[in-house]
Amino acid sequence: MKDRILAKLKETYPDYISGAQLAERLGISRVAVWKHIESLKESGYDIVAVKGKGYYLQHPEQAIIPSVILENLADPCWGRPIFYTGQAESTNLWARQLLENEAVPEGALVLAGQQTGGKGRLGRRWSSPWGGLYFTLILRPALDLQRASLLSLVMAVACARSLHQNTGCTCGIKWPNDVFIQGRKVGGILLEASGEMDKLDYVIAGIGINVNLMPQDFPEEVRHMATSLAIATGHSYDLNQLVVSLLKDLRQDYYLFLQKGFQPFREVYKEYCIHWQQPIMVHTGKNYVKGVHKDLDANGSLLVEAANGEIISISTGDVHLIHYQEE
Ligand code: BTN
């Protein structure tokens, strides 16, 4: 019912709709309308109530409405079913809990308006205030663990390409799967797998995109390194439309990868990568490796040429650009 109320508020935007009209159109009592509106406000929806006029949804582009997403999905598609909540600790965590308790099909979408404990790569936090996209896809690829690490690069290509096409903004990739715009991070991907080394049970692909966030929405310690689509382009985006496009593009690239492997993505990855053949410093957790990013190996590991000519392969770490020029 909350979803239907949101859809009606979005439909009537920029006009007000009275409690009585909502009650009549949805076949519920005015008290029930009021209760649902209160609960929507608690989960973060910016709904204004004005005496004598009714209800009004502010920033409707920020309002995630599952029924609007479902209506716009192509066929075949990802995003069926959608598990949605206004606030989750982490959609990756929620996806895992769902998988433990029920049979969730491939392509199911786990989506939250905001996260209180968003998880990032390498044990970091992912700041997830209202206005961003935070979702996890449940996948069941017939892959071993090594090939699944290539999937994380494929997802980065799909996101960077999709965001580029949808916003016109030049997007880049920082290895392995950070999405960048104008030298700052706009999105990240956290893939978690479960199963045996040689055959996975499932992969959960968590994706976070800073869509309509403003500088003050980021924690101070990351503000200088982060951006959002709204900051980069000067206008806000409809989260429902954006997630629909991302789902379509991610699905398409996922199946291409399952059929043809990483080869079709190699050149695109290279084209999007913001440090290909550039001097970089990689923090591997144990130490720092300095050199020139030469290539990727067959598993998607980073190949770095050190000053003495030695080629060092790095499977996990954090890349820092040494002389990255902003576009
Ligand atoms: C990174 O560190 O770059 C990866 C960030 C991944 C964040 C997304 S938001 C949706 C999903 N749920 C989480 O808790 N994390 C991922």
Image (spheres, rainbow, N blue to C red):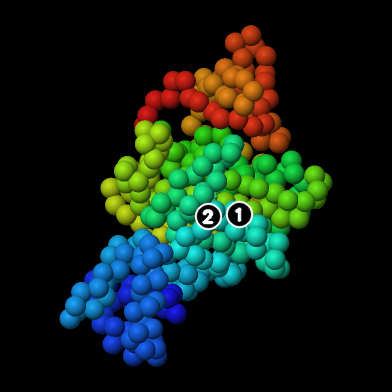
Mark 2 C-beta closer than 8 Å to ligand 1:
yes
Q: Residue at x 54, y 28 (%)?
A: 319
Quarter residue 175 falls in: top right
Q: Which residue is mark 1?
A: 93
Q: Residue at x 39, y 40 (%)?
A: 219
Q: Which element type, helix, strand or loop, lies under badge 1?
A: helix
The disc at residue 89 is: 2
Q: Residue at x 60, y 10 (%)?
A: 307
Residue 102 percent coordinates (x, y) = 70, 68
Query: Label 1 sits on what residue type?
Result: Leu
Residue 289, compared with residue 29, is above or below; it is above
| Residue neighbourhood size for the residue with mark 2, other residues' Cα within 10 Å, grouped as few (<14), some (14–19), many (≥20) | some
Do tag 1 and tag 2 residues touch (Cβ < 8 Å)?
yes
Q: Is residue 303 visible?
A: no
Q: Is residue 150 visible?
A: yes
Query: Label 2 sits on what residue type?
Result: Glu
